[in-house]
Image (tube, helix red, strand yellow):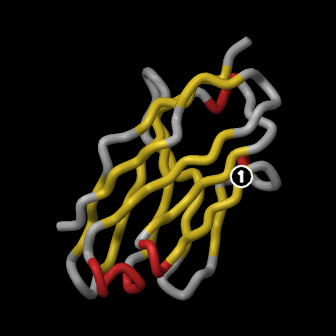
Amino acid sequence: QVQLVESGGGLVQPGGSLTLSCGASGGKWFPMFSMSWHRQAPGNQRELVAGISDGGRTNYADFVKGRFTISRDIRKNMVYLKMNSLEPEDTAVYYCNAKSTRLDINSWGQGTQVTVSS
């Protein structure tokens, strides 16, 4: 499996911004992974926030469209989630996921806490 390490979470005021980072092992195989960010708030199920395919196509949950941007750096084996206009409802633990059906990969990071509060 792939080792994923998230960073960049923290406390931010409503309307503020954060950028989450996820570093992935997997070396030369990283370009073959579809990467995504998910989140889970207390009492809620984990939900998809944004994804980026191995071909670079992106998709977003309706609740973050226009506010969040997912990107990846193939050379650094990194994926990012730029979050703008944060709302208290965005408070959750954010998880990075790497998936490849061809390589039988479905790995999760340990999560990073994002808290939006004044």
Q: Nearer the viewer, residue 11 or 53?
A: 11
Q: Is residue 47 left or right of residue 23?
A: right
Please give the name of the residue rendered at 34% of the width and 51% of the height, measured from the top-left corner: 5
Q: Is residue 52 left or right of residue 86?
A: left
* Above or below, comparing residue 26 to residue 66 in the picture: below
Q: Nearer the viewer, residue 117 or 76?
A: 76
Q: Is residue 96 left or right of residue 62?
A: left
* Local crowd size for mark 1, using a 10 Å CA cut-off: few (<14), some (14–19), many (≥20): many
Please give the name of the residue rendered at 30% of the width and 54% of the height, measured from the top-left corner: 108
Please give the name of the residue rendered at 64% of the width and 67% of the height, measured from the top-left corner: 59
Describe the element under mark 1 as helix, strand or loop.
Answer: strand
Quarter containing the N terminus: bottom left
Q: Residue 101: which quarter of the image?
A: bottom left
Q: Where residue 65 sits: x, y (%)?
A: 76, 54
Q: Where residue 106 sits: x, y (%)?
A: 27, 65
Marks counted in the figure total 1
* Above or below, comparing residue 94 to residue 41 in the picture: below
Residue that numbered label 1 is attached to: 68
Amino acid type, callout 1: Phe
Q: Nearer the viewer, residue 116 or 7?
A: 7
Quarter containing the C terminus: top right
Q: Where residue 116 sits: x, y (%)?
A: 66, 23
Most extreme residue toward the left, as rendered? 1
